[in-house]
Amino acid sequence: MNRTGSNLPAVGEYNQTVVLDAIRRRPEGITRSELAALTALSGMTVTKVCRRLIDAGLVDEHGTRANGPGKPAAIVRLNPGGGFAVGVHIDPAAVTYVLVDLSGTVRDHARSGTPTAGDPSAVIDEMANAIEALIAGSAVDRSRILGIGIASPGPVNVDDGVILNPPMMPNWHRVALRSALAEATGLPVLLEKDATAAVVAELWFAGPASSRDFAFMYYGTGLGTGLAVSGEVVRGTSSNAGDAGHITVDPGGDVCTCGRRGCVGYLVVPRTLVKRALGAGVLTAAEAGDLDDTGDVDAAFSRLADLAAAGKPGAAAILDDAARSLGRAIVVIVNLLDIDEVIFGGPFWAPISPAILAALPEAVSGDSALIPPHPVRFAQSAVPVDVAAVGAATLVLDNTFSPRPSALLLAAE
Ligand SMILES: [Zn+2]
């Protein structure tokens, strides 16, 4: 994804992000003349920007490369320890915190139970304390922390930094987390929907051969969908794009929270699969536990996945059904956006991934409703653990690095 810059003085900030982005994508280092060729900026602009990035500690010089008969050219590289970002992922079952460096590598992480948000100030205190403990424990210079990213179940109000009323978190209503955490920590804070944060992470870590048009199926307590089209995150008018949970995949199926029958976001989530396993006698009442307790559902869901992996027919049939339900929804998404890749991740994805990925490709390619003539690939996330938390931290890095028209407007004052 090469971008080119402009040599106009008013867009200095934009050029800086263009150069930084190009440097980051070459971990082995790059010379200034290569940067000029790659970004279409003048040699003088590249030299000036590199000087500024080196002074800021974001980039360093690392050896030289022979370049024809002239004097060897200095190689510039990203300095991973030049900046850090905190990522926070709020899930109905747990809050995960990560500290990542400029290269996106996780340096430290922590996890705690999710506060019930009956008292929003207690939630904010708890999260701010956990963030401070993570930073203090990491021995990272606090002045090097660029900011905090929060990934939350939707819907969210991104402009105001407010978590609205996530269906799986009944006590969370209009929690103004962004401003409260910014005030408590003194750091800039960004908020994004969890599945969208996962897409940001996926694009950040994507190799050159990665798809530019994909859906991210985020499998947590609920099912979220994040979207990328032409290599850009799809956010929509209110940053709530991608809610595919109410696509009907079984008109005779169970009633969803929305009142309709057979919505994919109801049929395939862990709680429903555990409920089905209990009803079919695949899990005993003791194994299924309390369906309204996230810890019990987690344990019962792992048990169900183990039984399916061991070949227990009832368990395998439940996961096979889930794969078919997912497949029908994926066909709708593929048709709508003409995407060629579907990526899976999220906290509950790993246990069922072998069973789902075994059945899904045929369910999708064999569906008579599938329109685009190209193959659809199915992949695991490039971030195998804590994708939403890493994605939340990547929001901060992305904001620092990625050249965007919005950044251009801000710089051209
Ligand atoms: Zn529904």
Image: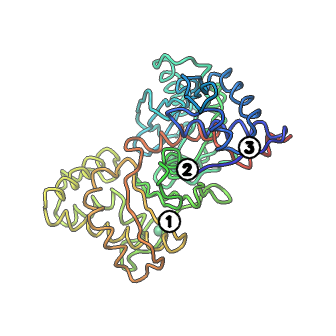
Residue bearing mark 2 = 193
Of residues 139 and 83, which is closer to you in this image? Answer: 83
Asked whether the residues under the numbered discs 1 and 3 touch, taking CB atoms below 8 Å apart as contact, a structural biologist would say no
Residue 49 rendering spot, x and y as whole percentages? 72, 31
Query: In the rendered view, would you say 6 is above or below 67?
Result: below
- Is ligand 1 within 8 Å of the beta carbon of the residue shown at mark 3? no
Residue bearing mark 3 = 407
**Residue at position x 36%, y 66% from top?**
267
**Where's the C terminus, which quadrant?**
top right
Asked whether the residues under the numbered discs 1 and 2 touch, taking CB atoms below 8 Å apart as contact, a structural biologist would say no
User: Could you tell whether 353 is left or right of 65 in the image?
Assistant: left
Could you say which quadrant of the image residue 59 lies in? top right
Query: In the rendered view, would you say 341 is above or below 373?
Result: above
Q: Amino acid at mark 3?
A: Ala
Of the numbered discs in the image, which one, if any, rests on residue 244?
1
Using the numbered discs, state the Cα–Cα distance from disc 1 to disc 2 in whole angstroms: 14 Å
